[in-house]
Structure formats: C-alpha cells, structure tokens
Image (tube, rainbow, N blue to C red):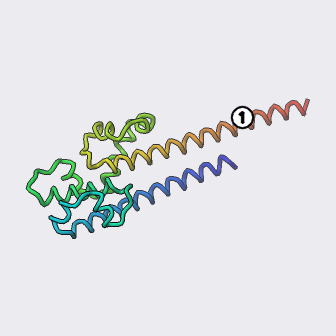
Amino acid sequence: QDKLCAEQEALMMRNAQSEALEAYGIIWSEIWETLKSWSHDKLCTTKLQDLLDILGFPDALDGAVEMAQNTICGILSVEKRSAEVDFLLESSFIETIKRIYNQLKEYGTDFVCGAKIHELLDLLGVDDRLDSAVKYVQDKLCAEQEALMMRNAQSEALEAYGIIWSEIWETLKS
C-alpha cells in the first residue's frame, strides 16, 4: 500500500508542480499587464516595497515585481537592454522558467539544492533580475529530490519488511 500510495503521491506532486508553474505564469502576466498600464514616471520612480504595497502583493513576489519593473523601465528608457531582457521579451515567462529548469536539472539536484541563488545565476549566466525565477526552479527541483528520496525510503522499508516476514515464515515452518 505504501509503495502504491507513494507512486500516486509522486504523480500528484508532479501535477501540483505543473499547476504551481502555471499559477506563477498567471501571476507574472498580471504583474506585467498591471505595471505596463502605469505611466513611465510613476512606475520607474516608485520603490519596490511601495509597488508591492500598492499592488497588494506579498513580499514573496518582490523578485517578479522588480523584474517586471526593471524590464519595462529598461524598455522605455534609452539604456541599452541586456540579452537576458531581450530573451525575456521575446519569449513568455513560462518558457524562461522551463529553460532554467532544464539547465539546472542537468547539473543534478545535489548541486542545485546546495547552491546559493547567486551561484546559480552566475552558472546560468543570467541577469540578477531573474533571481525569483531561478529560486522558483530550485525549490521545485529540490522538492522533486525530496519526493524521490521518500519513495526510495518507502521501497527500502517494504523490502526490509518482506525480508523479516520471510524469516518469520521460515522460522514458523520449521
């Protein structure tokens, strides 16, 4: 039962992660559309904490709001945009998350789960404004690793239970 339930739990976790990724994309789109509708002066001169307060967003979304603010202000100003910002503008935020996910997955969860966000940003060669996206992916990869370790522990416990049961059975038979 534990083995079957663990597989079901892993499937539910993958579905939950997919739903969380979609929800993050929706939130990102809402932030993007809201900030795009503001005047350039208002958006580019408002401090991040004030933006969060005005929008009614929790502090946990500060990276996404800051990234949107920096991107929009960079677009509307004469400053040269970075390649990461160009990439972000050319593709959807979800595609950016998927790209980061695939890149970090190649490094292995042991490394990714033990690394600091700035180390991962440097490794990926992306702008600091993508820190919330990298953190989100790191959290998802580490949650997957934890679920896999739990399944392995449950399998080992089931195997040990089978060994003990066999020993009891053999003892009773003799």
The quadrant the C terminus occupies is top right
- Residue at 24% from the left image edge and 54% from the top image edge: 88
Q: Residue 108 appears in which quarter of the rendering?
A: top left
Foreground residue among 45 and 158: 45
Q: Position of residue 72 (x, y in %)?
A: 19, 60
Left or right: residue 145 versus residue 50 is right
Foreground residue among 173 and 137: 137
Q: Position of residue 12 (x, y in %)?
A: 54, 56
Q: How busy is the neighbourhood of tag 1: few (under 14 within 10 Å), some, or many (20 plus)?
A: few
In the current view of this chain or complex, which residue is farthest to the left? 78
Count of numbered marks: 1
Q: Position of residue 102 (x, y in %)?
A: 36, 45
Residue with the mark numbered 1: 160
Foreground residue among 130 and 100: 130
- Residue at 30% from the left image edge and 64% from the top image edge: 31
> Looking at the image, is 164 positioned above or below residue 77?
above
In the current view of this chain or complex, which residue is farthest to the bottom? 37
Q: Amino acid at mark 1?
A: Ala
- Residue at 40% from the left image edge and 57% from the top image edge: 21
Question: Secondary structure beneath disc 1?
Answer: helix
Left or right: residue 103 versus residue 36 is right
- Residue at 10% from the left image edge and 52% from the top image edge: 79
Q: Position of residue 10 (x, y in %)?
A: 55, 50
> Looking at the image, is 157 positioned above or below residue 6?
above
